[in-house]
Image: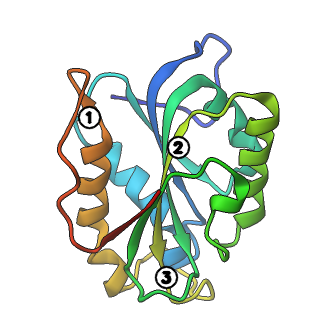
Amino acid sequence: MHIIPQILKIEMKRNKGTLILGIGNYLMGDEGIGVHIANLLEKEQLPTGVDVLDGGTGGFYLLEYFEIYKHVILVDATLDGNAPGTIRLIKPRFATDFPPAMSTHDIGLKDLVSALQVLDKMPEIDLFVVSIESIQQQGIELTSKIAAVVPDIINEIKCLLPINDQQLADPPFQNLITIP
């Protein structure tokens, strides 16, 4: 596994394998779940060709990463009205495929997907959204409900990673809702 620096290097080549991209504001508690997941995965032994990036609230600054990787796994928080800690897997092909109420950087991600479509550079995207109660909470700690599902999210992500060019079995967790 390689940890990618925040500034993209020119020598990076197109068509790299898989990027796990954690999105969110680390300073706003549960809203930073994607960043927390990225930070934890950076410490794990992942298959060759899998990179991890703390995308923060990068929006359009992340466009080049989507152009480089064949597969991008996003993790983000959402205010969708589901019980806090609900995990959903969405395979967005269009900006309209995103949940109706993403977190504070909603417009950036939707616009990013639209730009990728216009540029005809859309990678395969798997978006894990985690339902949170509010984005008003400030601090770097996750609430107990969100912290409790972190191991499940990490295991779900690992189930999407190719090992020796083969996909693992379907994710085993029952709190995952898959949306095609």
Is 14 drawn above or below residue 121 in the view shown? Answer: above
- Element type where label 1 sits in the image: loop
Q: Do the CB atoms of the residues marked 3 and 2 lie less than 8 Å apart?
A: no
User: Where is residue 116, by image quadrant?
Assistant: top right
Location of residue 90 in the rendering, given as x and y in whole percent from the top left corner: 49, 58
Q: Name the residue under label 1.
A: 46
Q: What residue type is labelled 2?
A: Ile
Q: What residue type is labelled 3?
A: Ile
Is 19 drawn above or below residue 148 in the view shown? Answer: above
Q: Name the residue under label 3.
A: 132
Q: Point out the frontmost of discs 3 and 2.
A: 2
The tag on residue 125 is 2
Location of residue 42 in the rendering, given as x and y in whole percent from the top left corner: 35, 42
User: Where is residue 78, by image quadrant?
Assistant: bottom right
Say how many tags the image has.
3
Q: Gap in Å between the C-alphas at discs 2 and 1? A: 18 Å
Q: Nearer the viewer, residue 39 or 31?
A: 31
